Amino acid sequence: MTQGISTLFDLLRHGEPVGGRKYRGQLDDPLSERGWQQMREAVGEHRPWDAILSSPLSRCAAFARELASRHDIPLEVEPRMMELGFGAWEGRTATELLEQDSQLLTRFWQDPVNHAPPGGETLVAFRDRVRGAFNDALLRHEGQHVLLICHAGVIRLLVSHALDMPLDKMFRIDVPSAGISRIRIDANGAGQLPRLVFHAGRL
């Protein structure tokens, strides 16, 4: 990045999907009517963005297309911004998993780096793909204001990165449906310095 340049990323989590609360991961459930309402209310008539970046999953991409079309903002769909893959847990609730094997889910909660879901994506692999996508977007959109429409896991990962938190602590960050966080990346003599401007706030 060019010294003295700042780049803004607004991170918008998708609204409520059809099917209720569960380990959804990379299942492509669409937004519910309430989910559409949540996202429209979160954004309102704001349109400060130079570009919109979206996960390819429909609970993100459908609203991204609507917003980009309404305000004539360039849209990029980035597969690497997809949610963490939960493998055999996808489509199941925490209650179901605890009833099946109380220790399996507990181990993940206590040490997610070393206890990935069965058949799921490791947290290290997730970190590498999301940060790779983010760094590429940062190069493409240097000095711009970008809206990233994505998932709770992606937002947790990027916020924890901005705060230099250990990877295994990222699930301590709560991300509400249609919540918005902002990260500013400043370039100076020390390199790229990401800062959390606000989390789960309003525009």
Image (spheres, grey):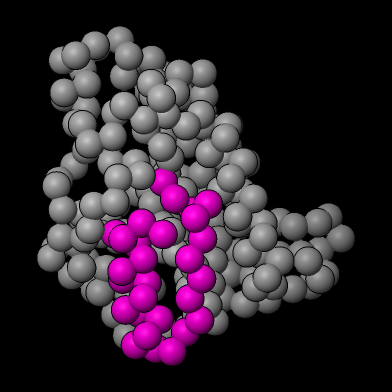
Is residue 141 shown in magenta? no
- Residue 45 point in image, percent of width and height: 32, 85
Residue at 57% across, 40% down: 127
Q: Report the magenta residues as a range.
A: 56-83
Residue at 60% across, 56% down: 134
| Quarter location, residue 11 | bottom left
Q: Is residue 179 above or below residue 103?
A: below
Q: Is residue 6 something that shows in the picture?
A: no
Q: Is residue 108 something that shows in the picture?
A: yes
Q: Is residue 65 above or below residue 33?
A: below
Residue at 37% across, 33% down: 86
Q: Is residue 169 above or below residue 146?
A: above
Q: Is residue 77 above or below residue 125?
A: below
Tell me the quarter of the image containing the N terminus.
bottom right
Q: Residue 118 or 186: which is nearer the viewer?
A: 118
Q: Main secondary structure of the magenta part?
A: helix
- Residue 164 point in image, percent of width and height: 62, 41
Is residue 75 shown in magenta? yes
| Quarter location, residue 8 | bottom right
Determine whether, in the image, residue 24 is placed left or right of residue 72.
left
